[in-house]
Image (cartoon, coloured by chain):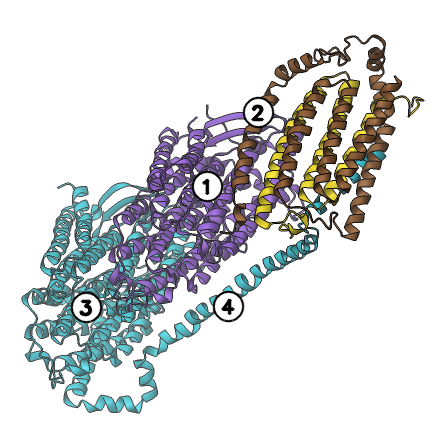
Chain colours: A yellow, B brown, C purple, D cyan
């Protein structure tokens, strides 16, 4: 391990750790929030976290493919948000409720 | 150099802070606004990484389109009363938090431990990038390009429409399907469970 | 290309039926398409070289190279008639279901065509994995046919049917994989081709079940025995038959049971000759028990369909017995009996379906005196009954006689038990016939306000080909036996070092 | 004409008749349908006459017409042709079948005139003739078996002809299934013989038959012939499988005449005669056949004495007469067997048709207690029936005398026979005379007991013509086989039948020269026995009708046992059929429902129980699932990192 000053020399790892923490934040939201819409937002957070990783790798590996992936991820994310929200709207129309606690129809 | 460092720490703070805010606010509208903040922060992070085009797209797609969508949906619902914002189960809540924590620890630990690996792999490119800032290739591949200067966008476009053109087209199809599907979903009166 | 055509044409037909826009004409389309398929399959008959025991009209392409899995089709004297039986029965079944299937018509016909592909694939595939795909595929449409269009307890019956057959197949898959591994050891490269399997010499030690060949033998046999079904794993059959709609019963009895017996001849006996010979006593005993048990239990069933289902157990017992005597008579008889059973039991189920459409009951005690009300129906039923109890000049006799002759030649002791099936078979069928058709008019028959209608032209058209076949096969068995002769000969003479050559 | 063409006409003409009548089965006109059917059989009769004429024209040793149409079945060494051959034995049979057959068809036109299903009836009848011809002419055991089962099938259809009556349908089923028992044995016999000779062709087997007798009970030929004989007991109604024949009287009376008296039931005898070179080398089988035949003759005759149904009496009489035929072939007198078969066909068909005529006149009344004195109403029927009566009880010079006497003599004289068999035969003959006379007395003679509502009348000409023809045959039919001893004393009248059959019948080994004095004596004993018992019967039933009742009362238990047919049906039901049905029910409940399915249920319960445990994990809570994914990732990551 190279001796670097963690605070002053920003490298790939910093971005990766930032990405990881953001991902974890999003994950916490998905796991713990009850509002479906906020859960969707948390998913967006997780996707963004991944994007950070991609771009960081892209830069430090000197490879433009990472950015292409980000591009794809964003498209997917937008699509996912659209469908997710459409489902949320439909659920709300049907049950007048968007609290995840009420949707346990898959109980075995 | 120091501005870059400061910039990073500042942006990291903003991104993580607003990310936390997303999940901590009980009012979903606030959450949405925090999310916008996080998105902008991420866009800025992209800028610090030299990915200007991506940063722009991030702003347009996320902070623009997606967020508008979220907010609009939120406005459709009447969500003022939000008493229990978190799932309440004690054991499962604890389990969830523990697993999240462990996950974070593992990822971060992994990243830190694997530092040598990345550094070794990237020593040459990093060194080269900082020294000459010129076009350099890692393994002689045609697609490994310099990511530092402003014709980055052009390169991005070239690669996107040559090497990844299939994925691009597939995404186009996907988006069309999604557009139709979303409309269909939103129109339906509750799907198979609909009360007539 | 011929075999591929007849194999995959039904799949295309299934698609056509699914996207066909008009609901009214779907039956006509399906019927026409199935006839087309039958005519194409007749080309196989025309091109078939009866003098050769080789695998004919083969089509061979590498599918998954790493494991030596091939797209490998071929036909020989053993599978030829079963292929034709399948393509022959399908149009008849579609015609017979004209009125009885009135919900989800599209789905039904599509399932039928998929099932046809699966059954043909089972008969034609020479590659083990390729075969296994079709073997399992055949379960799915059948599952839906029974589960959607079946009777009151259809869910119970389908699950029983599915689980019974599945249990066997799983072990077979393990055995297939092990055989593939053996081919790699023997020749250096892995192959799933049956022809390669034949070349593997599997060590066998008598006296214990715990040797490689016996274990593999039982792994395969269990799968096929459940399908046949051999006593005592037969209990799924009566339930499946009773709950299945008429077309389902016909295809089940007519073709699907033959998949089991055919595979004994194609896979088990040539692959594991020593074990087959060593354990022949077991299968002969089970077969004979099946003959007698099936007949006895059939006799006391109150439900016609269940009666015929148990009679299937009895008839399939003959087939099993015929195969495990390993001589010309037995094996030829078994092959012939497969066709017979397909024709006559298929026809019986069709007839039962026709009367069920009229009265909505299968309770024997509620019938009686039908002969006076439905004479044409009675004539057809009687002819098929004769075929089922193996009266000479009908098809059933040839098969049963040859099997018993072969059994006597190989194992005379068993024949004294097996022959009781001849008597009991007549007893249960004629007793049922008497109770349903003779005597005073039963409660379902005497309703003056709604007299039962005799067979319509369509129903007669369904039955006539089968009746013609009953007599044709009974009077001129040589027309059929000539095509299987070389293959059976090859199997009997080379049983212990079986191989199959490819005819270019 | 070409032989194969003639043979084809002979065989196919009834089949064509069947098909024509079968297609127009709903037609109710008796004259047309009956005309077609009768013509079909008559054509057969004519072609068989031509064929037999050709046969006579041939030299004695080469008398054989063999026609092979096509190869029926060929598997490895097992080859069966659809081939038929006429020799001296089958020549007699085809003449009887088509000749008597046409007469009975003719009679049926009158008898079945008012039945709605008359066309169907004639179709079945023609089908029967077709199958019977196949049985008789088939050149291999398997071809014979085709006809063998075919006639059983037609018998089933005709017995159950009035199927709406439950009893009659049941009788048909009983006949078929009882026959099936025999057929199963017949199959076994074929298997054994095929394993021994490698062929089922009758001529080849006869040629291959060894010349020395087989002593062992388990020898291949003994076993094979024994099985074939069991088959014959089914078809020809011998102990223990005779039970179906009395019930078979449920069918129309002409059917009883054709199938259950003249032709089908004699198939067993015919089969043994045709295979005589095989049977003669299996003395053990021969012994069994002779004993069974003799026992059946007495046993059935004793039941016949107690029956009140005119057809049942004749049915038991048939069983008894068949017993005589088996006695004959059992002691090696194959010619005598064939002879009796032929004369029996004449007089028994005559008596059945006569009884049909009576039943017709009495409006379907079959109980002889309600008849009596019919002589004056139905002179022709009475006259012809009378000829039948004297023929069957063996009064010289009527047909039955010659054949029955030859059988009795041979059972005494042949090295395969014994005096005991002769005694049984003679007792049977006396009983026959008794019950036949009883039948005559109660039906035609004595006082009329006919109910007032019934007005008996003579049958129409269509029905009396066959009666007259058969009556003549019953008188003269026996003259073709006048025994040597009588023929000699009457001035060298040759035994035509014996000469005719001589080339195809194997002689009895070690047969000594006959003593004429002994033969005359035995003949005298049996004829006088028959005459005496006939006289007693006449005395009982015409002179003092109360005596038989007294006697019956004095031996009540025995009488009841006999009149209830020795309770054999009840015995079979009690010991075989009912236990089989009840046992099957129990078997099914025990094995299928309670054992195999139980096992599967236990397994499924285990699986379900296991599922119940795992089920707790499926809370339906989306976030919990996500958490489980998370935990999974954590575990996977820790493994990757820690490694």
User: Which is more foreground, mark 1 or mark 3?
Assistant: 1
- The label number, if any, that marks residue D394 in the structure image: none
Mark whose residue sits in front, 1 or 4: 1
Depicted C490 relative to depicted D51: above or below: above
Spatial distance from mark 1 to mark 4, Cα to Cα?
37 Å
Q: CA distance from mark 2 to mark 1?
A: 38 Å
When asked about the image quadrant of residue B112, the answer is top right
Which residue matches tag 2? B172
Please tell me whether mark 3 sits on a helix, a strand or a loop: helix
For discs 2 and 1, the disc positioned in front in the rendered view: 2
Mark 4 vs 2: CB contact within 8 A: no
Crowd class of label 3 (few under 14; some 14 to 19; many from 20; radius 10 Å): many
Q: Closer to the camera, C108 or C126?
A: C108
Circle 3 chain: D
Please state if D611 lies on the left or on the right of B189 as rendered: right
Q: Position of residue D351 (x, y in %)?
A: 16, 70
- Residue D424 rendering spot, x and y as whole percentages: 30, 75
Which residue is label 3 attached to?
D253
User: Which of the image's four quarters has the N terminus of chain C?
Assistant: top left
In-image side of D252 versus D210 (left or right): left
Chain at tag 4: D
Query: Does dot 4 land on a helix, a strand or a loop?
Result: helix
Q: Which residue is mark 4?
A: D586
| Vertical comparison of C308 with D639: above or below | below
Residue picked out by circle 1: C115
Q: CA distance from mark 4 to mark 3?
A: 41 Å
Work out whether disc 4 and disc 3 sit on a shared chain.
yes
């Amino acid at each position: 391990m190279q001796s670097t000053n963690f605070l002053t020399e920003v490298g790939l790892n910093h971005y990766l750790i930032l990405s990881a923490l953001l991902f974890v934040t999003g994950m916490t939201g998905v796991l713990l929030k009850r509002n479906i819409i906020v859960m969707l937002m948390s998913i967006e957070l997780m996707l963004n976290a991944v994007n950070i990783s991609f771009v960081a790798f892209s830069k430090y590996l000197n490879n433009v493919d990472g950015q292409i992936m980000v591009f794809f991820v964003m498209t997917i994310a937008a699509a996912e948000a659209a469908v997710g929200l459409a489902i949320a709207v439909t659920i709300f129309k049907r049950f007048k409720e968007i609290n995840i606690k009420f949707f346990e129809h898959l109980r075995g | 150099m120091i501005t870059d460092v400061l910039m990073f720490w500042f942006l990291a703070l903003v991104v993580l802070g607003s990310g936390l805010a997303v999940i901590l606010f009980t009012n979903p509208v606030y959450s949405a606004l925090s999310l916008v903040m996080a998105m902008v922060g991420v866009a800025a992070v992209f800028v610090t990484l030299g990915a200007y085009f991506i940063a722009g797209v991030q702003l347009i797609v996320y902070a623009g389109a997606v967020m508008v969508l979220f907010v609009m949906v939120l406005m459709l619902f009447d969500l003022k009363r939000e008493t229990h914002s978190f799932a309440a189960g004690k054991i499962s809540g604890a389990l969830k938090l523990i697993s999240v924590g462990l996950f974070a620890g593992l990822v971060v630990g992994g990243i830190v431990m694997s530092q040598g690996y990345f550094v070794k792999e990237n020593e040459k490119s990093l060194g080269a990038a900082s020294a000459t800032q010129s076009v350099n290739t890692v393994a002689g591949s045609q697609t490994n390009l310099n990511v530092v200067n402003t014709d980055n966008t052009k390169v991005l476009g070239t690669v996107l429409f040559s090497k990844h053109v299939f994925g691009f087209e597939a995404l186009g199809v996907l988006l069309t399907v999604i557009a139709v599907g979303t409309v269909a979903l939103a129109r339906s009166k509750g799907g198979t469970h609909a009360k007539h | 290309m011929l075999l591929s055509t007849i194999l995959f044409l039904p799949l295309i037909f299934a698609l056509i039926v699914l996207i066909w826009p008009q609901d009214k004409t779907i039956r006509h389309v399906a019927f026409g398409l199935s006839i087309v398929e039958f005519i194409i399959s007749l080309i196989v008959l025309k091109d078939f070289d009866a003098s050769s025991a080789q695998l004919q009209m083969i089509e061979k392409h590498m599918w998954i190279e790493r494991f030596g899995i091939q797209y490998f089709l071929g036909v020989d004297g053993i599978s030829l008639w079963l292929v034709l039986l399948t393509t022959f029965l399908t149009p008849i079944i579609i015609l017979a279901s004209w009125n009885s299937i009135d919900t989800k018509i599209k789905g039904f016909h599509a399932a039928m065509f998929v099932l046809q592909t699966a059954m043909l694939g089972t008969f034609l595939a020479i590659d083990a994995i390729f075969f296994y795909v079709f073997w399992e595929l055949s379960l799915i449409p059948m599952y839906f046919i029974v589960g959607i269009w079946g009777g009151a307890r259809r869910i119970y019956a389908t699950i029983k049917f599915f689980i019974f057959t599945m249990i066997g197949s799983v072990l077979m898959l393990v055995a297939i994989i092990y055989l593939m591994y053996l081919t790699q050891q023997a020749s250096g490269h892995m192959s799933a081709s049956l022809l390669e399997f034949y070349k593997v010499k599997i060590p066998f030690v008598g006296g214990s079940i715990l040797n490689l060949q016996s274990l593999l033998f039982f792994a395969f046999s269990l799968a096929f025995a459940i399908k046949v079904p051999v006593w005592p794993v037969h209990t799924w059959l009566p339930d499946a038959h009773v709950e299945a709609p008429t077309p389902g019963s016909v295809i089940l009895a007519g073709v699907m049971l033959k998949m089991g017996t055919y595979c004994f001849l194609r896979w088990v006996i040539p692959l594991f000759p020593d074990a087959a010979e060593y354990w022949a006593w077991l299968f002969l005993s089970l077969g004979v028990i099946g003959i007698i048990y099936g007949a006895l239990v059939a006799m006391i069933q109150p439900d016609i369909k269940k009666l015929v289902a148990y009679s299937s157990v009895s008839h399939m017992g003959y087939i099993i017995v015929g195969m495990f005597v390993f001589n010309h008579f037995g094996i030829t008889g078994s092959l012939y009996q497969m066709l017979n059973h397909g024709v006559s039991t298929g026809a019986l189920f069709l007839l039962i379906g026709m009367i069920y459409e009229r009265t909505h009951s299968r309770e024997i005690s509620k019938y009686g005196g039908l002969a006076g009300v439905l004479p044409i129906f009675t004539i057809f039923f009687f002819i098929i009954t004769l075929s089922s109890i193996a009266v000479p000049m009908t098809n059933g006799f040839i098969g049963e006689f040859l099997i018993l002759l072969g059994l006597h030649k190989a194992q005379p002791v068993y024949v004294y038990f097996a022959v009781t099936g001849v008597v009991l078979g007549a007893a249960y069928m004629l007793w049922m016939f008497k109770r349903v058709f003779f005597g005073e008019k039963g409660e379902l028959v005497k309703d003056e306000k709604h007299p039962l209608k005799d067979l319509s032209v369509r129903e007669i058209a369904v039955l006539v080909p089968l009746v013609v076949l009953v007599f044709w096969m009974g009077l001129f068995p040589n027309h059929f036996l000539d095509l299987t002769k070389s293959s059976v000969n090859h199997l009997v003479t080379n049983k212990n070092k079986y191989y199959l050559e490819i005819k270019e | 004409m070409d032989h194969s063409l003639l043979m084809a006409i002979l065989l196919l003409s009834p089949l064509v008749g069947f098909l024509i009548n079968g297609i127009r089965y709903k037609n109710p006109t008796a004259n047309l349908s009956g005309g077609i059917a009768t013509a079909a059989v008559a054509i057969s009769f004519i072609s068989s006459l031509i064929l037999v004429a050709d046969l006579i024209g041939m030299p004695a040793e080469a008398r054989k017409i063999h026609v092979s149409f096509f190869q029926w079945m060929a598997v490895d060494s097992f080859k069966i042709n659809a081939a038929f051959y006429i020799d001296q034995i089958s020549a007699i049979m085809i003449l009887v079948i088509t000749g008597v057959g046409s007469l009975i068809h003719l009679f049926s036109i009158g008898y079945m005139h008012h039945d709605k299903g008359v066309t169907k009836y004639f179709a079945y009848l023609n089908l029967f003739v077709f199958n019977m011809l196949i049985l008789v002419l088939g050149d291999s055991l398997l071809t014979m078996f085709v006809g063998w089962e075919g006639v059983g099938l037609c018998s089933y259809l005709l017995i159950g002809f009035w199927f709406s009556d439950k009893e009659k349908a049941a009788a048909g089923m009983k006949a078929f299934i009882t026959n099936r028992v025999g057929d199963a044995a017949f199959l076994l016999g074929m298997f054994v013989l095929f394993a021994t000779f490698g062929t089922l062709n009758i001529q080849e087997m006869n040629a291959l038959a060894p010349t020395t007798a087989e002593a062992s009970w388990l020898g291949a030929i003994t076993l094979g012939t024994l099985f074939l004989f069991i088959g014959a007991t089914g078809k020809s109604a011998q102990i223990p499988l005779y039970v179906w024949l009395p019930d078979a009287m449920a069918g129309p009376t002409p059917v009883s005449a054709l199938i259950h008296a003249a032709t089908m039931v004699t198939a067993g005898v015919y089969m043994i005669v045709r295979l005589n070179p095989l049977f003669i080398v299996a003395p053990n089988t021969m012994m069994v056949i002779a004993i069974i035949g003799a026992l059946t003759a007495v046993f059935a005759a004793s039941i016949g004495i107690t029956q009140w149904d005119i057809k049942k009496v004749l049915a038991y009489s048939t069983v008894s007469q068949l017993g005589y035929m088996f006695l004959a072939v059992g002691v090696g007198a194959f010619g005598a067997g064939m002879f009796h078969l032929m004369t029996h066909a004449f007089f028994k068909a005559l008596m059945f048709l006569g009884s049909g005529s009576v039943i017709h006149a009495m409006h379907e009344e079959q109980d002889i207690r309600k008849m009596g004195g019919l002589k004056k109403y139905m002179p022709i029927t009475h006259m012809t029936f009378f000829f039948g009566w004297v023929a069957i009880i063996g009064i010289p010079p009527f047909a039955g005398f010659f054949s029955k006497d030859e059988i009795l003599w041979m059972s005494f004289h042949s090295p395969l026979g014994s005096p005991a068999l002769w005694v049984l035969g003679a007792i049977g003959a006396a009983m026959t005379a008794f019950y036949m006379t009883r039948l005559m007395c109660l039906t035609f003679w004595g006082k009329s007991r006919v109910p007032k509502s019934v007005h008996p009348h003579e049958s129409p000409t269509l029905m009396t013509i066959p009666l007259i023809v058969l009556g003549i045959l019953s008188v003269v039919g026996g003259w073709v086989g006048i025994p040597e001893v009588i023929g000699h004393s009457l001035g060298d009248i040759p035994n035509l039948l014996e000469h005719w059959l001589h080339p195809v019948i194997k002689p009895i080994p070690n047969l000594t020269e006959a003593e004429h004095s002994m033969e005359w004596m035995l003949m005298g004993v049996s004829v006088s026995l028959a005459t005496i018992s006939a006289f007693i019967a006449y005395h009982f039933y015409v002179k003092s009708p109360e005596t038989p009742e007294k006697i019956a009362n004095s031996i009540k238990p025995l009488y009841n046992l006999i009149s209830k047919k020795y309770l054999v049906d009840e015995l079979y039901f009690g010991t075989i059929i009912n236990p089989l049905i009840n046992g099957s029910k129990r078997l099914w409940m025990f094995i299928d429902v309670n054992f195999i399915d139980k096992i599967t249920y236990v397994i499924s319960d285990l699986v379900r129980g296991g599922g119940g445990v795992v089920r707790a994990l499926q809370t339906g809570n989306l976030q919990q699932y996500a958490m489980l994914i998370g935990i999974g990732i954590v575990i996977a990551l820790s493994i990757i990192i820690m490694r």
